[in-house]
Amino acid sequence: MTDPAPHALLHGCGLPQAWGQQAAWRILETRFHQGLRFLATWRAWLDDAQRPRMLHYVALSTDPVSAQALLHSAAPFPDLLPLAQELSQQWFGLLPGFHRLALQQGQVLLTLCVGDARTLLREQQFAADSVYLDLPDAFANVPAWDRWTVKALARCCRRGTGVAAVHLSPDVRESLSQCGFEMQQTQGSFNPRWELKHTRSQSPKAAVPGRCAVIGAGLAGASVAAALARRGWQVQVLDAADAPAAGASGLPAGLVLPHVSVDDSPRSRLSRCGVRLMLQQARSLLQPGQDWQASGVLEHRLDATAGLPANWPAAGMDWSRPAPGLAAGTAWGQGMAADAPSLWHAQGAWLKPARLVQAWLAQPGVRFQGQARVAAIRRAGDEWLLLDAAGKVLATASLLVLAGACGTDALLDALKSSQPALQDGIQRLPARHGMRGQLSWGLQQAADAAALPPFPVNGLGSLIASVPVSGGLAWYAGATYEADTQPPAAPAEHHHLNQQHLQTLLPAAAQALGSRFEAGSVQAWSSTRCVSADRLPLVGPLEPGDTPSLWISTGMGSRGLSFSVLCAELLAARLGAEPLPVEASLARSLNATRLAKQADTASRQVFIPSRNNDITKM
């Protein structure tokens, strides 16, 4: 049923007056319905000259409506319909969990949380400024709110959080009172009679935007710079190279696609969130058909596994679905393994990472400084000093983010040696290692067209067949994976391996391009990726306490296009005490020091021989 008064809870919380001249405002809605209350709040934000720079809107939903229902509910409201149309473009793949939708160039952030209300509230890590309280009625096919759910809501509030309700039953009103809410009719606030100890208001304090320095101008560093600049920070990005994206982020073209697994693992769920955020950035900043293309990606699963969980729901099909026979009868599909399952990733795309890095660094509030090799970092009071090899100060900032791949450890070791007082305050990073990779590429010839697929194909390596470059259309095959602890193989060996992989993945394409491989006319692009032990990025503070000023975002491996924006948004959210873009339990799997702590725990284990002479961990 459409809400006949979409502005009622907005005004019941004293908005828009209450958010006047604030840096950010955080709203929690307990029942999304058809989205009219969100649209009305967004419209009020747009119309208010005193609006906060950032509007965060977290909404709970047991079963999201369709994009068509969003548009239908907004149709009677001419001022809301254009906003509903913009929102509907991102309204896909709403599986259980958190979904971050960025609007207004990232200054309006809707986090739609799908699932059971109590579970979703416990996954939050922020304190709301306003709560739109709409509870299920007696005929709704969802669990009623009990005291434990109200208690979970209280943990998402600070003292003074405004509350406006649609209706309150006597039992819910009593639970609200017992949990610290003071309600007069359907309006009130969170104002417990006891000292707060366990609410989100005890989380780290929001940092006041100021000057930030980022070391590293690849996908990791540039995405952090853009995310912080959107929130009002002045960001200086330093890199030893002349131009940005000089390392692994200079990949000529890469794939954006979600990871899949039969158990829908944390890696798979995180990758979907990351892909959604990356696609939002690409649509906002890049030229389609030239810098990127929402092409979809075919994944040929040569390990013969289906990949997707059993009973994959309809919302999941928006992301990835079985694609039997997609290549059948095509010239480019000749010779492909017919018994290997395939998946179609509808939200997949190819993208030129360097173009996106350049677009991020061109955002207002961001300044790039090349030929600036940072040899040392020092703490001087509340400031960070970034020094070159001669000891000259390259930059100063109140916030420092390390995004320089595997070179970060040397900076931290030197910092601890030069300033022993920081030895215990700077947390140890887990081990990372470099993985070299080479991409094989060339210009497409007229005779190649029929043998090359019209969209990227991924599996054993990948092929992106038609990427516009200055000389025409380029194809890219690969890339290889070689540990940097091993002697480097010759470029010709990498080309040979890419050719072998292409022969297995797409025999027709391998045959069409084979003469160029054999003649040695194929070109190469190579670099080294920074990889963590569990192949997930490392993001977060490297200092304890409520106001850490040293942060890191690194270890993207070969999935920088899937994880860089997610890590940047996660860093910005934790720094600014904002709602997280993913569930708190998922966010913990990306904590920068997680692997180091695991290693420390393991090293403290006591081992004793058992009776059967095995080694048993105690």
Image (cartoon, grey):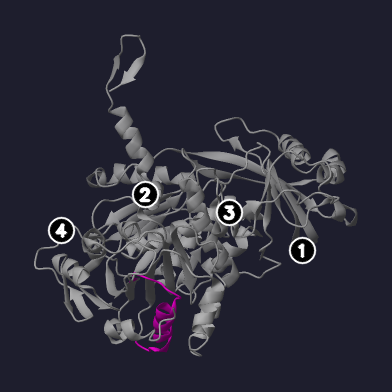
Say if mark 4 contacts mark 2, CB within 8 Å: no
Please tell me which residue is depicted at 36% across the width and 43% down the height of the picture.
Answer: 594
Q: Residues within 10 Å of mark 3 (few under 14, many from 20)?
A: many
Give the SS element for disc 2: helix
Q: Which residue is mark 2?
A: 588
Residue flagged by tag 2: what amino acid is it? Answer: Arg
Q: Residues within 10 Å of mark 1 (few under 14, many from 20)?
A: few
Please tell me which residue is depicted at 46% across the width and 75% down the height of the picture.
Answer: 34
Distance, label 4 to label 3, CA atoms, is: 44 Å
Q: Residues within 10 Å of mark 2 (few under 14, many from 20)?
A: some
Name the foreground residue: 159 vs 4: 4
- Mark toward the viewer: 4 or 3: 4
The segment highlighted magenta reads 29-50
Give the SS element for disc 1: loop
Q: Which residue is mark 4?
A: 197
Disc nearer the start of the sequence (4/1): 4
Residue flagged by tag 4: what amino acid is it? Answer: Lys
Q: Which residue is mark 3?
A: 249
Residue flagged by tag 1: what amino acid is it? Answer: Ser
Mark sitting on residue 470: 1
